Image: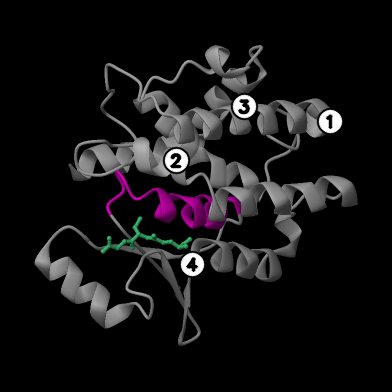
């Protein structure tokens, strides 16, 4: 099984299924494509039906899209319990992961990741401002506070124990750190900042970060 990813330093989409596969203790190899080089673009054209990463190659099939790979993992590794056991928590965990997967364009645009803005190893000195990004940050803080308050009693993650939304929000935590976003100025009472720090301290994310810095 092979996971095809973009550069570890800034491919936020690639980090998500990698974290999910690690949680499942899946055996897989990783191929990193430098999507910013002409050779990488040519390789992307050859291997990716959507011309995007991440991709999971398994049993001769190429699964594209980070959410599709996460759903496949939940099917293949049911013992890992990638979604919360409580039905209400599970419905909202899917809502939260899907909201991240399909939204927050203001944050993605104004707090972009790329060669100059990496998930680890660099910090910008000032935070971006603008209506769309401000709204997204407020929404994320509110979502994190609500889910932690309602479902977080069993552990430090969004729904207590680790689940797929934690993988989807880890790159958000890295953006918040890189762009030095003051969560208290966006409605946080400390709960969202503590959750951000939990995501950034996950052993699997630290492993990803170490590899990203070593590749640099
Ligand atoms: N919805 C897709 C989005 C994937 C995506 O946008 N990938 C970006 C990189 S992180 C990409 O492959 N870009 C190719 C390029 O910029 O040429 C997913 O969740 O996997």
- Position in image of residue 177 (x %, y %): 41, 24
Crowdedness near tag 4: few (<14), some (14–19) or many (≥20) residues, C-alpha within 10 Å: some
First in sequence, mark 1 or 4: give its number.
4
Quarter of the rendered structure image containing ligand 1: bottom left
Considering only order in the chain, which callout, 4 or 2, is on the residue closer to the N terminus?
4
Q: Which residues are magenta?
A: 7-23
- Residue 79 lies, in percent from the top left, at 75, 59
**Residue highlighted by disc 4:** 65
Secondary structure of the residue carrying tag 2 is helix
Residue position for label 1: 150
**Who is closer to the viewer here, 125 or 17?**
125
Compute the Cα span from label 3 to label 4. Answer: 26 Å
Q: Is residue 8 magenta?
A: yes
Q: Which residue is mark 2?
A: 106
Judging by the rendered image, the residue that carries numbered circle 3 is 141
Q: Residue at x 50, y 57 (%)?
A: 17
């Amino acid at each position: 099984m092979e996971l095809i990813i973009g550069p570890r330093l800034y491919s936020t989409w690639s980090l998500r299924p990698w974290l999910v596969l690690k949680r499942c203790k899946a055996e897989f190899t990783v191929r990193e494509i430098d999507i910013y080089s002409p050779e990488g673009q040519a390789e992307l054209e050859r291997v990716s039906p959507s011309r995007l990463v991440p991709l999971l190659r398994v049993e001769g099939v190429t699964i594209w899209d980070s959410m599709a790979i996460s759903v496949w993992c939940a099917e293949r590794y049911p013992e890992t319990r990638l979604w919360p056991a409580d039905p209400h928590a599970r419905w909202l965990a899917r809502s939260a992961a899907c909201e991240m997967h399909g939204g927050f364009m203001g944050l993605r645009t104004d707090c972009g990741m790329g060669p100059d803005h990496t998930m680890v190893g660099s910090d910008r000195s000032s935070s971006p401002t603008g209506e769309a990004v401000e709204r997204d940050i407020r929404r994320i803080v509110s979502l994190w506070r609500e889910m932690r308050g309602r479902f977080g009693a069993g552990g430090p993650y969004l729904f207590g124990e680790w689940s797929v939304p934690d993988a989807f929000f880890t790159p958000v935590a890295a953006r918040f750190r890189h762009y030095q976003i003051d969560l208290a100025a966006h409605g946080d009472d400390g709960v969202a900042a503590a959750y951000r720090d939990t995501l950034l301290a996950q052993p699997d994310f630290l492993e990803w970060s170490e590899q990203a810095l070593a590749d640099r």
